[in-house]
Amino acid sequence: MKLPFQVIYEDNHLLIVSKPSGLLVQGDHTKDRTLLDHAKVYIKEKYDKPGEVFMGLVHRLDRPVSGLVVLARTSKGLERMTELFRKREIQKTYWAIVKRKPPKKQDKLTHWLLKDESRNYVTAYDYPHPEAQKAELTYRTLGYLNDHYLLEISPLTGRPHQIRVQLASMGCPIKGDTKYGFPRANEDQSIHLHARRLYFVHPVRKEPIICVGPLPETDFWEQFLTLDDFEVKDKFLDNLY
């Protein structure tokens, strides 16, 4: 069975996969086949399950974003994982590539985000704004190569388009993200944002779970993996700041 995703973790309650950019997570107006659709087929065929397969979506990734997505195979798993996300008891780490040098090597960003549902577009404000939701993240610069910077981002809240619009608001739109200010689209319509790592305590097994999503197999991502170890990169980056 050829899968459009990579299975990272699987048990009776959860299915955690790494999705490619371009794969829709949940149905929309395009009617394209989704990650949920493919995951149901995977479970049905692997375990020869009769009838409809239960598959719950715990959280979402934007279509042009790659990386880890948590799905639930049981209603108990869905309810408990959703609660972990609600309580912010899951550590999420993303990698992003930007063209412009961040103002600081590492920092915390705070904005108030307001989404225009009709345009699927989020505006960030530097101050509290009516109906806007507070959004916070931390970032640190991991590497620099060919006039681009690799950032590691830890969102402290979970707002729509949060990382994309907050990085753009500090003058560093993500490579390929024309919606939020990058001048050119990537040829494959992806953006260079990847859900890299998840850490949480399994809500049923009560065991710590760490998942890492492999980077997309493209030259632009893979060239950052050829950089020297982080200590060497840190010394080099200190000279940039």
Image: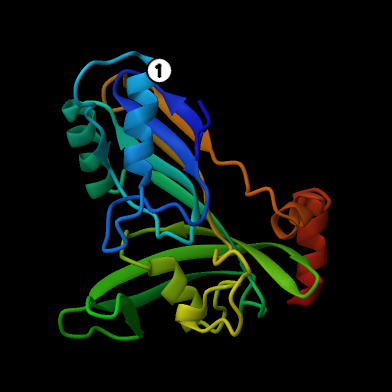
In the rendered view of the protein, which quadrant contains the C terminus?
Answer: bottom right
Question: For this rendering, which residue is in front, 27 or 172?
Answer: 27
What amino acid type should be assigned to the residue bearing mark 1? Lys
Dot 1: what SS?
A: helix
Q: Is residue 184 above or below residue 78?
A: below
- Residue 121 position within the rendered picture, expressed as x and y whole percent measured from the top left: 33, 78
Q: Quadrant of residue 159?
A: bottom left
Query: Mark 1 — residue?
Result: 46
Task: Characterize the local packing of mark 1: few (<14), some (14-19) or many (20 or more) Cα atoms within 10 angstroms.
Answer: few
Tell me if 151 is positioned left or right of 228 in this view: left
Q: Is residue 201 visible?
A: no
Q: Is residue 150 visible?
A: yes
The answer to which quarter of the image holds residue 148 is bottom right
Q: Position of residue 31 (x, y in %)?
A: 29, 56
**Residue pictured at 39% horizontal, 53% vertical:** 24
Q: How far across and how far down the image is residue 14, in percent? A: 33, 28
